[in-house]
Every structure is written in structure tokens, then in C-alpha cells.
Image (cartoon, grey):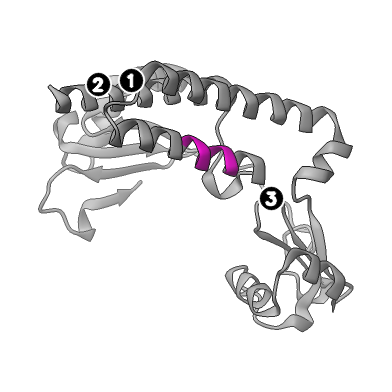
Amino acid sequence: MTYVWIVFRIVSVMALILFLILKTGRRKIGELPIYDFLSVIVIGSVIGADISEPNIPHLPTLFAVVLIVALQYFVSCLLINNKKIAKKITFGPTVIIQNGQFIKSNMERLKYPIENVKAALREKDVFDLNEVAYAIVEGSGSISVLRKPQFLPLTPSDMNLNTTAKGLCIPLITDGKVYDGNLEQLKRDRKWLSIQLKQVDIEDFSKVFYADISSDGRLYISKADPRQNLSNDYTL
């Protein structure tokens, strides 16, 4: 009976947290501000105690989780509407390289050593500090980099070239399931899709693992055959 009760606790807590997250918004863990990260740690501690100690009353734990998430939501709204408070309890964007020079005082305040800066720059494909005009540590801890003009890659606008807009690829089939709604938006139907598949020797939708169409009408098809090799991927 104890194990059944533990399972019930886990399921109920997970369902509650999922509901609360959907109501309060979602972000990647790596992008959580410091207060949100602290809330995650506290919730984890509360839930861990509840699951590991079956003798602890369950309802107070659920109430504690709701209270913590509600407090986190309230603080998030407060930070959005009050920038002065936000600066006091969160890490805002901080410039650590300006005009190619390190700002030592900001790095010391953030406890951000040069080695970490260089590692973050390498992740941005910057291996030479001479290329950096500005570097900013964001609130999430990641670094944004602006290169000096002479080290920026050329773009079509730099060369006065005309370009065409490129939209998103629209999925048509996933694991044999046809997206009829997408076909309708494209003013196509299953008959048209079947004809396209027959051109690459596919007779049935179930034989397709994934297929989509680009904004310029190019069709991508990947077979569902587990023995497939690279020659089974087609771009029309």
C-alpha cells in the first residue's frame, strides 16, 4: 500500500506542476532568471521530501507547491512592471567587453573570469579577441557577441544582391500520418501527394517516415523502411 501511495503522490504532484507551468508560462531551464531558478530548487526540495517520506501529509505539500509557483508568478509580474526592483533581485544584461576592451569591474562584479569569457566566445565561433567589439552577459548567463565590422560575414545586402523570401517548411506526413489540414491550406489533396510519392517509388503513405514541402515547392521525403540508407532520402 505504501508504494501505491508513493505512486499517487508522484502522479498528483507532476500533474499539478504541469498545470501550473502551462498557466504561468514556459522557458528553457538555461534561460531562467535567478529567482525562477531558486523557485525550481525549493519546489524540488519540497517534492523530494514528500515522496521520500510517505508519513508526511500530502495536501500541505500540494499547497506549498501552489504557493511557491504563485509567489514566483507574482514576482515575475512585478519584475516586468518595475524595472528598479528587477535590477535589485535579478542579473540584468552586463557589458564585459566594450570597443574591444575588457571591463574588469563588471567581470569582477559578476565573478566571471576571462577563461569563461573565452570559452563562451569560442561557442560563438570567435577564436580571436581582436574580432570582438562588444560582449554582453545576459541574465541567463549566456554571452551575446557583436563583432567588429571588418569581421562580420558578408550578406546579400552588402553586395546589393536581390533575395527572395523563404518561409517555413510545412509537414505533410509524419510516421505514415498525413496532415490533411496542411494539404488543404496548400490547396492540395491526398491524390496530389500520392502522385508525388509514386515518382520516388512509394505506393503507400505508411511507407513514409517524414515528408514536408518548402515555400518554393520542393518536396522532401524520407522512407519509413528501417533498412534505409542515404539513397532513400529524396529532394524533388
Q: Mark 2 — residue?
A: 8
Q: Mark 3 — residue?
A: 163
Residue type indicated by callout 2: Phe
Tell me the crowding category of disc 3: few under 14, some 14 to 19, or many 20 or more residues within 10 angstroms, Cα based: few
The answer to whether residue 24 is left or right of residue 153 is left
Measure the C-alpha gap from mark 1 to mark 2: 6 Å
Tell me the crowding category of disc 1: few under 14, some 14 to 19, or many 20 or more residues within 10 angstroms, Cα based: some
Asked which quadrant contains residue 158, the reply is bottom right
Tell me the crowding category of disc 2: few under 14, some 14 to 19, or many 20 or more residues within 10 angstroms, Cα based: some
- Front label number (3 vs 1): 1
Percent x, y of residue 136: 77, 61
| Residue 167 seen in the current view | no
Residue occupying image coordinates x 25% and y 21%: 8
Query: Measured along the vertical axis of the image, is residue 109 above or below residue 61?
Result: below
Measure the C-alpha gap from mark 3 to mark 1: 53 Å
Q: Mark 1 — residue?
A: 12
Percent x, y of residue 233: 26, 52
The answer to whether residue 158 is left or right of residue 15 is right
Residue type indicated by callout 1: Ser
Q: Which SS class for mark 3?
A: loop
The answer to whether residue 174 is left or right of residue 133 is left
Q: Nearer the viewer, residue 199 or 50?
A: 50
Measure the C-alpha gap from mark 2 to mark 3: 57 Å
Q: Which SS class for mark 2?
A: helix
> Residues at badges 1 and 2 in contact (C-beta under 8 Å)?
yes
Provide the major secondary structure of the magenta segment: helix
The magenta stretch is 38-43
Does residue 233 show up magenta in the picture?
no
Residue type indicated by callout 3: Thr
Percent x, y of residue 64: 50, 24
> Residues at badges 2 and 3 in contact (C-beta under 8 Å)?
no
Asked which quadrant contains residue 44, the reply is top left
